[in-house]
Amino acid sequence: MGFVTLPLGRKSQEPVAAKDARLNVVAVALLLIPIGIGIVWSAAIDGPWPFLASLPIGFTLALAPRVAKQWERAVVLRLGKYVGLRGPGLFWIVPFVDSVTKWIDQRVITTSFAAEETLTSDTVPVNVDAVLFWLVYDPEKAALEVQEYQAAVSWAAQTALRDIIGRTSLTDLLRGRERIEEGVILGQAEEEIAHSFSKAAESYHNNPTALHLRAMNMLYEGLKEKGALMLVPSSAVESMGMGGLLGAAALRHDALAASKDAPPTKIE
């Protein structure tokens, strides 16, 4: 999802959502300059039309400049289609065509949550309050793939905490939070590993040659270790044509063993 979770702490502070409508110096200048020209022009011709025409022009120009803070990234849509991230600093959008839908804060954020009335592994009901320190490292995925990513992080952390409490005894729970912190980090690592294996399986699915080369490389890395033992399914040997490779590896292993056991040759 594009998130990094950090260990649990004590004190909490709810993240503050940034507002979409923002006032900046460049926008104010682009608003006032056309209006000022319209006022001077209207006074010169003694008519209101230049001033009235400068109002929509000034307001339209004021919508173009946007400013993102150093820790922010702005998600820009053009007619509903994602066109990219903008910021930090000054950037421009096309008025009435582009829209800034989200301002993603990439600083470390603290979110408090509670696992109410959760049973430990020894069936003892406990109430646990915790704080999650987290940050967004991929603003694009956070904005486009999750409706409310801040709420999603909070609910996911609460579910993970309940699961960990359910697998922890009351004694271990009272002993300290180090074991709980470790189980949150290990759970995330397992999820990332599973995601990597899933992507690798998709890559190998339509490319049997790459799969064969990867299998041969794994066999080579395993068999080059002295005394290594590898169990290879017969189906893999038949489908990937590994019989020759395994035979050559076995002969090489026997030759190395024979040369090692042979008595040293005496040279006079």
Image: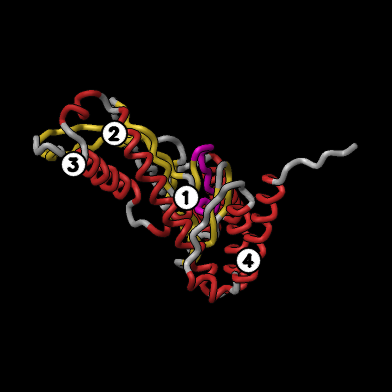
Q: Residues within 10 Å of mark 4 (few under 14, many from 20)?
A: few
The residues tagged by marks 1 and 3 sit, at their Cα atoms, a distance apart of: 33 Å
Q: Could you tell me which residue is drawn at 42 percent across and 35 percent down?
A: 108
Mark 2, other Cα within 10 Å: few <14 / some 14–19 / many ≥20: some
Q: Can residue 48 be spotted in the picture?
A: no
The answer for how far apart the CA atoms under marks 1 and 2 are is 28 Å
Q: Which of label 3 and label 4 is nearer to you? A: 4
Question: Is residue 173 in view?
Answer: yes
Image-quadrant location for residue 83: bottom right
- The magenta segment is 62-71
Residue under label 2: 180
Q: Is residue 101 above or below residue 268?
A: below
Give the image location of residue 27, x and y in percent. 53, 46
Depicted 79 relative to depicted 165: above or below: below
Residue where numbered disc 3 is placed: 166
Q: Residue at x 50, y 53 (%)?
A: 63
258 with respect to 26 (left or right) = right
The mark that comes first in sequence, 1 or 2, is 1
Q: Residue 249's x, y, as percent? A: 64, 60
**Label 3: how many Cα within 10 Å (few below 14, some 14–19, many 20+):** some
Numbered tag placed on residue 139 in the rendering:
1
Q: Earlier in the sequence, mark 4 or mark 2?
A: 2
Along the polypeptide, which appears first: circle 1 or circle 3?
1
Q: Which mark is residue 247?
A: 4
144 to 89, vertically: above or below: below
- The amino acid type, in three-letter code, at marker 4 is Gly
Sequence-first disc among 1 and 4: 1
Distance from label 3 to label 2 (Cα)?
11 Å
Sequence-wise, the earlier of marks 3 and 4 is 3
What is the three-letter code of the residue carrying label 1? Answer: Pro
